[in-house]
């Protein structure tokens, strides 16, 4: 019989290097999964849909019989695939310097398993793996329990400092420098795959779903020291198509702010560098068109003419007038305490990071 683990015990063993097998379908896994989990689907996407239809039409017994007919002929292949995945997991752990739960033969046979709710799929996979000689440990409540844990994790208090500044100030570069200096940093735009403005997706690939971002945030949040501040960029709740969950957005909405002022000319230059290049023009024009109602017809027309003519700096300067006004309203709306305002003479993320770290070291979080 498999051992049943609660979410904390399950994650502790995963962190120690035990391999994790996700029994859900490929589409479920691709959407979002537990960090480090490897996909070994009991049913593929079409099979899962057919079993679901059988359950809805004829009840659970018919669904179980169909699942057995579909999965039965594949048992040997699935066990062989499990062996390969577990070897792959152990090889990865060895490269990362993680323990696999001991050096003896029996310790290497430990494996963690879950499905969506800890039901038929994980029990079926556990049975097969036990036949194959593994000691199986199942997650109580399945991936659903992990999702509940992730949302709860994001409510845990941490001292937070919010890095603010007008669009084009180079806040992402400042955060990267802060992290290099040893500060605790979470780059939300990196996780969301978007730079935050209407133009934030230009030149980047597609974004992950909210669920994936929440899982990644929770994994990082849990490992942060509560004795030191965490730096977050001042973001809207929506970053492109990703919407930060309310529990996490509270950290941004209510935490003290450190503002960095960068001259307008330097911000224009930074953004013009970021958004020029092959294939950018049409994407930029489409973004301006989406902003037409906010910019006004005349301003949008001039901006699009500048982009078509390659006058990117003129277009950026016009757009920043809109974004600067919008950001000033956003800061006033939240009414957060201002810890420090840093005025830079130019675009210098390295200097900014040193000054931000000095601010952190002098800051006393409210009791």
Image (tube, rainbow, N blue to C red):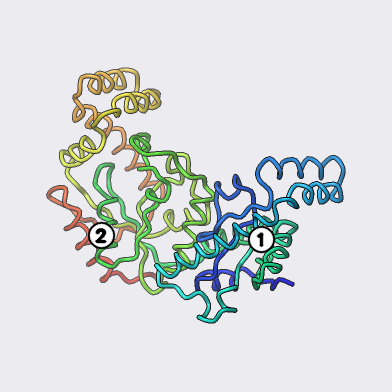
Rendered location of residue 113, percent (x, y) = 63, 64
The residue located at (40%, 52%) in the rendering is 188
Q: Quadrant of residue 93?
A: bottom left
The residue located at (20%, 57%) in the rendering is 352
Mark number displayed over residue 142: 1
Rendered location of residue 208, percent (x, y) = 48, 45
Q: Quadrant of the C terminus?
A: bottom left
Q: Quadrant of the N terminus?
A: bottom right
**Secondary structure category for the residue under label 1:** helix
Rendered location of residue 320, percent (x, y) = 26, 34
Rendered location of residue 350, percent (x, y) = 18, 57
Whichever of callouts 2 and 1 sits on the residue coming sooner in the sequence is 1
Above or below 150: residue 263: above
Q: Quadrant of residue 187?
A: bottom left
Cα separation, mark 2 vs mark 1, equals 45 Å
Q: Read off the residue under disc 2.
A: 340
Give the residue at the far left of this rendering.
Answer: 345
As rendered, which of 101 and 128 lies closer to the eye? 128
Q: Residues within 10 Å of mark 2 (few under 14, many from 20)?
A: some
Q: Residues within 10 Å of mark 1 (few under 14, many from 20)?
A: many
Above or below 89: residue 101: below
Mark number displayed over residue 20: none
Q: Is residue 236 left or right of residue 125?
A: left
């Amino acid at each position: 019989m498999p051992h049943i683990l609660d979410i904390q015990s399950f994650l502790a063993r995963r962190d120690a290097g035990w391999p994790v097998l996700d029994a859900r379908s490929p589409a479920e896994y691709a959407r979002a999964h537990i960090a480090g989990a490897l996909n070994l689907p009991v049913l593929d996407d079409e099979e899962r849909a057919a079993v679901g239809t059988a359950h809805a039409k004829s009840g659970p017994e018919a669904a179980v019989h169909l699942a057995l007919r579909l999965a039965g002929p594949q048992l040997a292949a699935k066990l062989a695939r499990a062996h390969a995945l577990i070897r792959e997991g152990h090889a990865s752990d060895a490269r990362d310097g993680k323990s696999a739960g001991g050096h003896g033969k029996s310790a290497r046979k430990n494996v963690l398993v879950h499905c969506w709710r800890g039901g038929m799929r994980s029990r079926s996979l556990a049975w097969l793996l036990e036949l194959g000689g593994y000691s199986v440990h199942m997650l109580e409540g399945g991936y659903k329990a992990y999702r509940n844990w992730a949302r709860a994790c994001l409510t845990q208090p941490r001292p937070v400092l919010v890095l603010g500044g007008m669009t084009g100030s180079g806040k992402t570069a400042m955060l990267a420098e802060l992290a290099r200096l040893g500060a605790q940093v979470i780059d939300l735009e990196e996780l969301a795959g978007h730079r935050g403005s209407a133009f934030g997706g230009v030149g980047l690939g597609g974004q992950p779903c909210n669920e994936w971002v929440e899982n990644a945030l929770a994994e990082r949040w849990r490992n942060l020291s509560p004795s030191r501040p965490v730096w977050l960029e001042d973001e809207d709740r929506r970053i492109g198509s990703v919407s930060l969950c309310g529990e996490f957005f509270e950290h941004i909405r209510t935490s003290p702010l450190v503002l960095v002022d960068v001259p307008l000319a330097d911000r224009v230059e930074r953004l013009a560098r970021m958004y020029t290049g092959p294939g950018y023009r049409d994407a930029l024009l489409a973004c301006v068109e989406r902003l037409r109602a906010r910019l006004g017809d005349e301003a949008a027309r001039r901006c699009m003419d500048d982009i078509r003519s390659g006058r990117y700096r003129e277009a950026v300067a016009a757009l920043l007038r809109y974004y600067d006004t919008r950001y000033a309203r956003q800061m006033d709306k939240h009414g957060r305490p201002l810890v420090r305002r840093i005025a830079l003479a130019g675009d210098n993320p390295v200097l900014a990071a040193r000054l931000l770290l000095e601010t952190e070291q002098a800051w006393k979080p409210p009791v």
